[in-house]
């Protein structure tokens, strides 16, 4: 609570594994979701501090990731070299697919939660985009014409969802149409590798940071 400096410590007594990566807040009711090193995604109630749902099976994950759709209905998580999508309310597994080469580095839903993008940890910089409700998959190379591992990936929601990726050693930021993968803009200015990148909520600004 921003007005209360006393922290609420959320734990999982049944599976006391370290939590990795960012936490995601869900509203109505207030909950928080995070991923453990054991490959389980957990959903806590902020009213009671107790785990109210677990997603997946316990298994070691070298890069545990979890992402929640903007409407709070769906959750995506990594599982070894696969990606799983769950209905949050029912806990039902909606989709399980093979992830990008080498495993996933980032996960992002489109605004409506009907599409999911996963970037690769490999040096190729590929991104896979799935429709959550069917088996279609559209692989795109988000390293751009220069290739290279992605350092960050974000979705800018709007009338046309945009996929923003930074190309690592390519020293550029690419803005793509989420649906087609088409490069809409290439943002230059860095002289060295890009390590961080984000976009404003309204999509008006993109900020990136790196070694130069």
Image (tube, grey):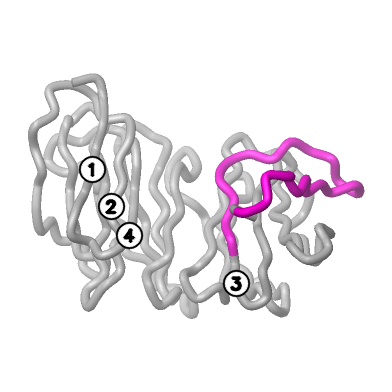
**Label 2: few (<14), some (14–19) or many (≥20) C-alpha neighbours in 10 Å:** some
Q: Nearer the viewer, mark 3 or mark 2?
A: 3
Residue denoted by label 4: 155
Q: Nearer the viewer, mark 2 or mark 4?
A: 2
Give the residue displayed 50% in from the left and 76% down from the top: 71
Q: Secondary structure at mark 4?
A: strand
* Residue closest to the far front: 3
Q: Nearer the viewer, mark 3 or mark 4?
A: 3
Circle nearer the N terminus (3, 2): 3
Give the residue displayed 66% in from the left and 59% down from the top: 32
- As measured in the structure, the alpha-carbon distance from the residue carrying label 3 to the one carrying label 4 is 20 Å
Residue 113 x %, y %: 45, 74
* Residue closest to the far right: 14
Residue 97 x %, y %: 53, 61
- As measured in the structure, the alpha-carbon distance from the residue carrying label 2 to the one carrying label 4 is 8 Å
Give the residue displayed 77% in from the left and 61% down from the top: 54
Q: Where does the N terminus fall, quadrant-wise?
A: bottom right
Residue 27: mark: 3
Q: Which residues are magenta?
A: 3-25
- As measured in the structure, the alpha-carbon distance from the residue carrying label 3 to the one carrying label 2 is 22 Å
Residue denoted by label 2: 199
Residue 21 x %, y %: 57, 41
Q: Is residue 175 left or right of residue 152?
A: left
**Label 1: few (<14), some (14–19) or many (≥20) C-alpha neighbours in 10 Å:** few
Residue denoted by label 1: 207
Q: Is residue 136 above or below residue 200?
A: below
Q: Are marks 1 and 2 in contact (CB under 8 Å)?
A: yes
Q: Main secondary structure of the magenta part?
A: loop
- Closer to the camera in the image, 10 or 43: 10
Q: Secondary structure at mark 2?
A: strand
Q: Where does the C terminus fall, quadrant-wise?
A: top left
Q: Is residue 7 magenta?
A: yes
């Amino acid at each position: 609570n921003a007005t209360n400096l006393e922290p609420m410590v959320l734990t999982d007594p049944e599976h006391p594994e370290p939590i990795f990566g960012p936490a995601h807040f869900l509203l109505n009711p207030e909950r928080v979701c995070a991923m453990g090193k054991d490959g389980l995604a957990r959903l806590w109630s902020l009213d009671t501090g107790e785990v109210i749902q677990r997603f997946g099976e316990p298994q070691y994950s070298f890069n545990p990731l979890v992402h929640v759709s903007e409407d709070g209905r769906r959750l995506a998580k990594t599982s070894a070299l696969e990606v799983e999508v769950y209905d949050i309310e029912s806990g039902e597994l909606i989709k399980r697919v093979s992830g990008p080469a080498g495993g996933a580095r980032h996960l992002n839903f489109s605004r409506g939660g009907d599409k999911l993008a996963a970037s690769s940890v490999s040096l190729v910089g590929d991104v896979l985009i799935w429709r959550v409700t069917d088996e279609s998959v559209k692989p795109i190379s988000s390293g751009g014409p220069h290739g290279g591992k992605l350092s960050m990936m974000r979705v800018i929601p709007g009338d046309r969802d945009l996929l923003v990726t930074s190309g690592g050693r390519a020293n550029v930021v690419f803005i793509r149409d989420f649906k087609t993968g088409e490069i809409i803009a290439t943002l230059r200015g860095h002289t060295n590798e890009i390590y961080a990148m984000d976009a404003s909520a309204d999509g008006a600004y993109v900020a990136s940071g790196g070694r130069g």
